Amino acid sequence: MPRHIAIIMDGNGRWAKQRGMDRVMGHREGVETVRRIVEECGKLRIPYLTLYAFSTENWNRPQYEVEALMRLMSAAIRSEVPKLMENHVRLNAIGHLEDLPQVCQEEMSEACQLTAKNDGLTLTLSLSYSGRSELKYCIRKLAQQAIDGAINPQDIDEQTITNSLYTNNIPDPDILIRTGGEQRISNFLLWQIAYTELFFTPVMWPDFDGQHLREIIYQYQNRERRFGKTSEQVQQENLDGTQK
Ligand code: IPE
Ligand code: IPE
Ligand code: MG
């Protein structure tokens, strides 16, 4: 089973448009999908789920849509806490959270605190997040530490960078799913997905369900992750592993 699934939840706007509805209705429906997928991941005992909810670039959308998204987010976070507790979900947020409206920040930090001791799924929401901006803040932090004499630039290795990102205590995703048919990364988790298995589905996010998720996990289980090695090496290692 995968340890960490990351999802670019795309297609809300088109889903609504296809039905002659306002884009915001698609986002509303998208919240239902989040609930469904969180529950499914809990049932499947997936330890980490990371959702791309709002990108740094999404601030450039029409103001009414941005405001509606923020309101929807605050309301959803508040109303979901009992359900999160019931399902043992620990809520977490990554991104430049200072950009979010004050109420949103407060709802988020309160919900994170309330669920901090849960030992089930770790649900991470990416809010005002982009991979490049995450790397920018990471580099600034390391540069400052070097100036302060706390670290030697020669000692900065891949682990140092991994540990300085928002995702420092989360393993790299095994699976990245993008719904909505586009085949691009749109600035999500750039460093972390170096060896992630990618899945693109035409299903719009409001229509995505547990069955779609299980089918992707099944496909994942039939892929050979070689991490640069040959197929023969990987098969030998698997054999050695089962014999141990
Ligand atoms: C994803 O759906 C949700 C957010 C980016 C917040 P979209 O709103 O991008 O939906 P489409 O791509 O326009 O259909
Ligand atoms: C990516 O979707 C961001 C989120 C799902 C939050 P977008 O709809 O913003 O991506 P682009 O603009 O199509 O690349
Ligand atoms: Mg989109």
Image (tube, rainbow, N blue to C red):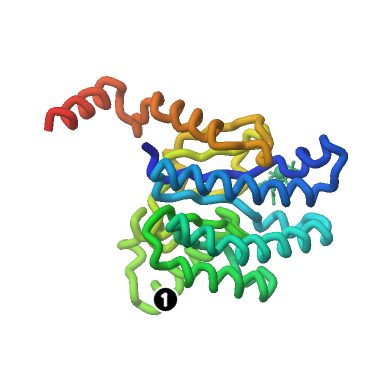
Name the residue at 87% across, 39% down: 20
Left of 20 or right of it: where is 90? left
| Side of 244 where 228 appears, left or right | right
Q: In the shown orientation, is residue 128 left or right of residue 220?
A: right
Q: Position of residue 39 (x, y in %)?
A: 51, 47
Name the residue located 80 percent from the left edge and 57 percent from the top edge: 65
Residue 136 makes an appearance in the image: no
- Rendered location of residue 134, percent (x, y): 54, 60
Which residue is painted at 42% across and 41% down in the image? 44
Q: Ligand 3, what quadrant?
A: top right
* Residue 102 position by quadrant: bottom right
The disc labelled 1 sits on which kind of residue? Answer: Ile
Disc 1 element: helix
Residue at the spot of label 1 = 147
Out of 110 and 157, give the one closest to the viewer: 110
Looking at this view, name the residue that lies furthest to the top. Answer: 232
Q: Residue at x 35, y 34 (%)?
A: 227
Residue 1 placement (x, y as % from top left): 37, 37
Relative height, residue 193 to residue 166 (above, below):
above
Indicate the quadrant containing the C terminus: top left, top right, bottom left or bottom right: top left
